[in-house]
């Protein structure tokens, strides 16, 4: 029987948040790209929470946008409520979160994909990857026997590989939301020597809005002034009428029901083999883990404008249907709740991401990249940013350019990928602010300033945009210099101003910057004392404010980064056999050989590699300078 | 490859018969040509054969500085595997310094401590076993740093540091989890609580820094314990070692009489003899010398000199000491070899596998053997950690000061009402600074650091 054979530059397997970014990046960089999905109707589906962003995840979306990705633009077009979280804390932890109209989000992304040049969409399950004798990827094969030749492939299979959903005793062999699972690819990956993990995650029920009593809940409004996710979105375009969310709480009765039925939860009865995320726990987990808490927050969030379904945030569960109904009905405002879709847990195959380079290319299959939940992460934003990097790097490889590798001091994306490829990870990885050591520098407000250079270098950021970011950086610098030079004398007007603002009067003249550092004063309020102030865009003023107010902290963090960079800059050879270095412990040799870290810094983050091991490698590197200078300078350039 | 040329005085800077100035690097031959004149001014040392020695004079311009012998060694057949010149001159401090200055003036730069050895190592001159011993040093570094902080700062101080570090990381973790999970963890009232905790830690660190200032300035050297039963001859041995004309003796008063140390220079190797007060004052008081006392000294020492009275039989006290020193670097001295012996080398060998030397403190025989044994142990790297004790000690103090400054910044942030997420930057810095004391922080300049522990001319 004649089979279809088609030729592409890049094959992207899966059209979730990772797959979409990967495919768009490759196609936009001029590569002939095809994206496969088990259902075109589920492109960019949000099978769990109906929102984008949130603590630290909002940072990821900003960074995706700064590099030229799509997620931020897509949510700006389809959000129905938006909030800047953590405003009472420092600027580093401010984080944007928007409620999405799920259907609109998915449809909008589908439209973008369909209107992108060089991009083909195909609804089919991919069952095999094909490689040549040198372990280069040469194509993928579908369940129907069609072959799609390619020079690079990106796997973004999400939670679909050998997926099964569990609601109490009921087990359904499907992907999320009843969609078809992908059952064949795992075997092909194993044949190529790829190590497979099995992870678990879960989602709460969706309930009928008409069955809820909102008078017993607290209304959660969006921000009065909405800040867009995308740096390219006009802020005026996002000032829309917003839809409310609702806050309610579980109580002792809820917890009693859960405790009384734990034996029927597949998580606790041992039916579930996969490891679940500690940081996105089911309500069962919360009740067991925080036994001393007599209530937990429940957020009721709309799933969209054209649906009555509401998402019950905070109550994900794998308990049986009857227990779900009983426990939901104990929550104030949900006494008569009708469940539209049951909560469920889902198990799926993913990989041990230690098999990847920081470029997200497999170490043992050349030209094969991967991103998203397939790499053992959780969350739409985590998926999207990996998809973007995997897509960019597949393209860089085919275009013969250097891969885009962000380090831990440049971006949350860098932290996330470094953690995935370096550290041992036995549960779905979620981004958290605490994972970023240098978060005062990695703010959501400066993502464009941090990453525009990279976005421009790889070719996803337009020239206009890039020039604007450079111009913005210049304005910020000049304004900071100016306010350091503006001297404020201890005259009557100034003292009066200070008194009005509950600020201590001046003994002697100071700079405007000095005054700005006082907690009770800021850039805007000081306009009164600063008549020569230029008219600057809001985003510039914002940067000036943060940089001046927190100057000391920023400087100290920069120092920490310098220390970190020194170790990152000490590069290690690739495909190196660490047993050649005498004095390393066997455990370390094994881990180093397996992971092949690119730098001393990365090596130092491998669990089980001690400071003493790192010292031994440092001595080896130093000796290399003399014994094999060619290799040494190849690794370190000539700037030593 | 470009390597610059280094020079240093290779011998001790004390008045002695002969002094050596060593030059290594690609300009070594050019430099010696510029400053050396043979008797008839007819020789260019850059043209002579390798491994030859030449009589002549060192000139700085027109001025003759000294009459010298110059040894020429060409790359790669030298210690550093680079072109090397050694100038043997008269051993006066002034002369040596003048020659070194002349060499530096003509194109060399002063060598850093250990730089000759470092070059030898990096150029592959040091063979595998020696390179491995360098790696051994590294491997034992963390453990060693612990031991040294134990002996230097005393055990309770080490515990203090570990405990304070734990307190800091606990607070960091609390802030971080609260940021990640605001639903379950509240930061209400946290700044006040943190303020108290940080101030408590600050008090302890300040006390530690003061104790470092108060009198714990110990001269660099191998911490050496002289142990043995009463009347074995410890005191006489000490007097010989201290009393020799070449020895430089310094008394360093510790916080108590017990920690009094004396510094002895054995052919350029520095020994700090622990508890000299104990040795001198209790030598004759049989009851006062307990095995416990010896135990404390042994624990603190890098090198143990165990003195046995060979005119007596080994007894329970000896076996107790042997047990304690079996895992230490140690030398056994069979004293009173001038008297009829009851305990011989073979008797001791049965119980302990350490170098054994016959001496007579009274007749002053065997002392050279002792010196040579110590020297060999030092140059073979067996007891080469010694200087690190001091380096880490200076670093300990600096690390404490850094930690203190960081914690003060935390207090400052709290007082200025900054949001909680700002506290972690400086808490983390304090945590890292304290980590350097117990060897849990990474050092990028490790190679430089190891070799800086060697002596200058090496």
Image: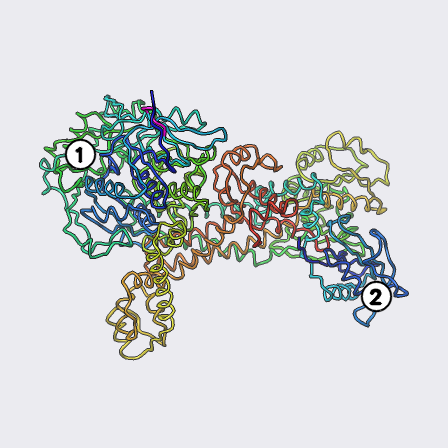
* Secondary structure beneath label 1: strand
Q: Is residue B232 left or right of residue A182?
A: right
**To which chain does the residue with label 1 belong?**
A
Q: Residues within 10 Å of mark 1 (few under 14, many from 20)?
A: many
* Circles 1 and 2: CB atoms closer than 8 Å: no
Q: Residue furthest bottom?
A: A491
**Residue at 81% from the left image edge and 37% from the top image edge:** B311
In the depicted structure, whether residue A137 falls above or below residue B431: above
**To which chain does the residue with label 2 belong?**
B
Q: Residue furthest front?
A: A2
**Residue at 18% from the left image edge and 41% from the top image edge:** A301
Q: Nearer the viewer, residue B269 or B362?
A: B269
In the depicted structure, whether residue A95 falls above or below residue A124: below
- Highlighted magenta segment, given as a residue range: A143-147
Q: Nearer the viewer, mark 1 or mark 2?
A: 1
Circle 1 residue: A206
**How would you classify the magenta stretch by its main secondary structure?**
loop
**Label for residue B298?**
none
* Secondary structure beneath label 2: strand
Circle 2 residue: B66
Q: Nearer the viewer, residue B147 or A482?
A: A482
Q: Is residue A487 magenta?
A: no
- Total numbered circles: 2
Question: Gap in Å between the C-alphas at discs 1 and 2?
Answer: 96 Å
**Residue at 30% from the left image edge and 75% from the top image edge:** A532
Please provide percent x and percent y for residue A110.
24, 40
In the depicted structure, whether residue A590 falls above or below residue B395: above
In the depicted structure, whether residue B256 falls above or below residue A372: below
Q: Is residue A320 left or right of residue A184?
A: left
Please provide percent x and percent y for residue A292.
27, 36
For the residues tagged 1 and 2, is the chain the same?
no
Q: Is residue B277 visible?
A: no
């Amino acid at each position: 029987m004649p089979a279809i054979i088609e030729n592409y530059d890049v094959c992207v397997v899966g059209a979730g948040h990772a797959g979409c970014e990967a495919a768009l990046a490759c196609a936009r960089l001029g590569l002939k790209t095809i994206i496969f999905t088990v259902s075109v109707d589920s492109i960019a589906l949000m099978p769990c929470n109906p929102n984008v962003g949130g603590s630290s995840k909002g940072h990821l979306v900003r960074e995706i946008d700064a590099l030229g990705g799509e997620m931020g633009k897509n949510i700006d077009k389809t959000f129905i409520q938006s909030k800047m979280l953590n405003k009472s804390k420092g600027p580093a932890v401010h984080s944007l979160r928007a409620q999405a109209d799920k259907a609109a989000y998915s449809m909008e992304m589908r439209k973008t994909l369909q209107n992108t040049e060089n991009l083909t969409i195909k609804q089919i399950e991919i069952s095999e990857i094909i490689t040549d004798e040198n372990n280069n990827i040469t194509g993928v094969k579908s369940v129907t026997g069609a072959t799609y030749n390619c020079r690079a492939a990106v796997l973004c299979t999400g939670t679909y590989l050998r997926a099964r959903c569990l609601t109490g005793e009921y087990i359904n062999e499907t992907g999320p939301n009843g969609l078809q699972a992908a059952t064949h690819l795992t075997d092909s990956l194993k044949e190529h020597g790829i190590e497979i993990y099995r992870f678990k995650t879960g989602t709460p029920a969706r309930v009928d809005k008409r069955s809820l009593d909102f008078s017993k809940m607290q209304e959660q409004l969006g921000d009065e002034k909405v800040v867009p996710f995308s740096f390219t979105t006009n802020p005026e375009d996002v000032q829309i009428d917003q839809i409310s969310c609702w806050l309610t709480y579980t109580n002792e009765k809820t917890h009693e029901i859960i405790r009384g039925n734990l034996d029927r939860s597949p998580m606790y009865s041992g039916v579930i083999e996969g490891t679940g995320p500690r940081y996105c726990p089911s309500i069962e987990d919360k009740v067991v883990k925080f036994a001393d808490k007599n209530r937990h927050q429940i957020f009721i969030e709309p799933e969209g404008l054209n649906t009555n379904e509401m998402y019950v945030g905070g109550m994900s569960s794998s308990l049986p249907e009857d227990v779900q109904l009983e426990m939901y009905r104990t929550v104030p405002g949900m006494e008569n709740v009708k469940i539209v879709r049951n909560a469920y847990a889902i198990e799926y195959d993913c990989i041990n991401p230690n098999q990847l380079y920081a470029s997200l290319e497999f170490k043992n299959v050349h030209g094969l990249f991967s991103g998203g939940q397939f790499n053992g992460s959780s969350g739409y934003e985590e998926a999207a940013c990996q998809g973007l990097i995997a897509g960019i790097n597949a393209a860089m490889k085919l275009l013969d350019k250097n891969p885009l590798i962000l380090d831990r001091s440049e971006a949350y994306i860098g932290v996330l990928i470094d953690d995935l490829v370096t550290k041992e990870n036995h549960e779905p990885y979620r981004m958290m602010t605490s994972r970023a050591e240098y978060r005062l520098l990695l703010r959501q407000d400066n993502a464009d300033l941090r990453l525009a250079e990279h976005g421009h270098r790889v070719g996803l950021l337009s020239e206009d945009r890039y020039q604007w970011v450079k111009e913005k950086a210049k304005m910020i610098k000049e304004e900071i210099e100016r306010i350091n030079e503006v001297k404020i004398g201890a005259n009557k007007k100034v003292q009066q101003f200070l008194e009005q603002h509950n600020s201590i009067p001046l003994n002697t003249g100071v700079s405007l910057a000095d005054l700005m550092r006082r907690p009770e004063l800021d850039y805007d309020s000081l306009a009164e004392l600063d008549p020569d102030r230029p008219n600057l865009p809001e985003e510039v003023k914002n940067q000036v404010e943060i940089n001046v107010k927190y100057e000391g902290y920023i400087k100290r963090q920069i120092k920490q980064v310098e220390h970190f960079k020194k170790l990152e800059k000490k590069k290690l050879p690739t495909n190196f056999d660490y047993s050649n270095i005498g004095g390393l412990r066997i455990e370390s040799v094994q881990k180093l050989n397996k992971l092949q870290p690119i730098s001393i810094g990365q090596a130092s983050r491998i669990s089980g590699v001690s400071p003493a091991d790192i010292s031994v490698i440092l001595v080896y590197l130093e000796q290399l300078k003399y014994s094999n200078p060619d290799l040494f300078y190849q690794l370190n350039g000539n700037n030593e | 490859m470009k390597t610059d040329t280094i020079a240093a005085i290779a011998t001790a800077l004390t008045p002695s018969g002969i002094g050596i100035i060593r030059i290594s690097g690609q300009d070594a031959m050019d430099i010696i040509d510029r400053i050396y004149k043979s008797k008839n001014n007819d020789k260019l040392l850059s043209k002579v054969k390798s491994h030859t020695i030449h009589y002549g004079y060192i000139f700085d311009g027109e001025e003759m500085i000294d009459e010298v012998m110059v040894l020429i060694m060409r790359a790669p057949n030298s210690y550093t595997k680079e072109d090397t010149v050694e100038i043997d001159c008269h051993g006066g401090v002034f002369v040596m310094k003048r020659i070194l200055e002349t060499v530096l003036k003509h194109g060399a730069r002063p060598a850093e401590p250990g730089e000759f050895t470092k070059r030898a190592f990096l150029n592959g001159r040091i063979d595998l076993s020696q390179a491995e011993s360098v790696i051994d040093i590294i491997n034992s570094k963390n453990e060693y740093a612990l031991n040294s902080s134990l002996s230097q700062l005393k055990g309770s101080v080490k515990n203090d540091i570990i405990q304070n570090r734990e307190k800091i990381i606990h607070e960091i973790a609390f802030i971080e989890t609260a940021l990640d999970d605001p639903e379950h963890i509240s930061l209400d009232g946290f700044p006040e609580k943190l303020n108290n905790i940080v101030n408590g830690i600050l008090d302890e660190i300040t006390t530690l820094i003061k104790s470092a200032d108060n009198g714990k300035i110990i001269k660099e050297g191998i911490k050496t314990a002289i142990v043995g039963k009463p009347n074995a001859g410890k005191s006489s041995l000490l007097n010989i070692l201290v009393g020799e004309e070449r020895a430089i003796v310094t008394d360093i008063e510790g916080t108590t009489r017990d920690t009094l140390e004396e510094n002895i220079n054995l052919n350029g190797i520095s020994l700090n003899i622990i508890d000299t007060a104990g040795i001198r004052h209790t030598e004759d008081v049989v009851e006062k010398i307990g095995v416990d006392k010896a135990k404390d000294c042994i624990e603190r020492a890098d090198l143990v000199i165990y003195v046995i009275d060979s005119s007596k039989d080994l007894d329970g006290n000896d076996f107790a000491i042997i047990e304690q020193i079996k895992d230490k670097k140690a030398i056994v001295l069979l004293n009173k070899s001038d008297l009829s012996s009851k305990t011989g080398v073979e008797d001791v060998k049965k119980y302990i596998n350490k170098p054994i030397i016959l001496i007579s403190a009274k007749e002053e025989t065997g002392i050279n053997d002792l010196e040579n044994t110590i020297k060999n142990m030092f140059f073979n790297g067996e007891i080469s950690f010694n200087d690190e004790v001091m380096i880490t000690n200076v670093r300990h103090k600096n690390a404490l000061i850094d930690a203190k400054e960081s914690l003060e910044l935390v207090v400052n942030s709290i007082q200025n009402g900054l949001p909680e997420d700002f506290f972690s930057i400086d808490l983390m810095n304090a945590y890292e600074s304290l980590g350097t004391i117990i060897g849990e922080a990474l050092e990028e300049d490790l190679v430089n650091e190891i070799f800086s522990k060697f002596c200058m001319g090496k």
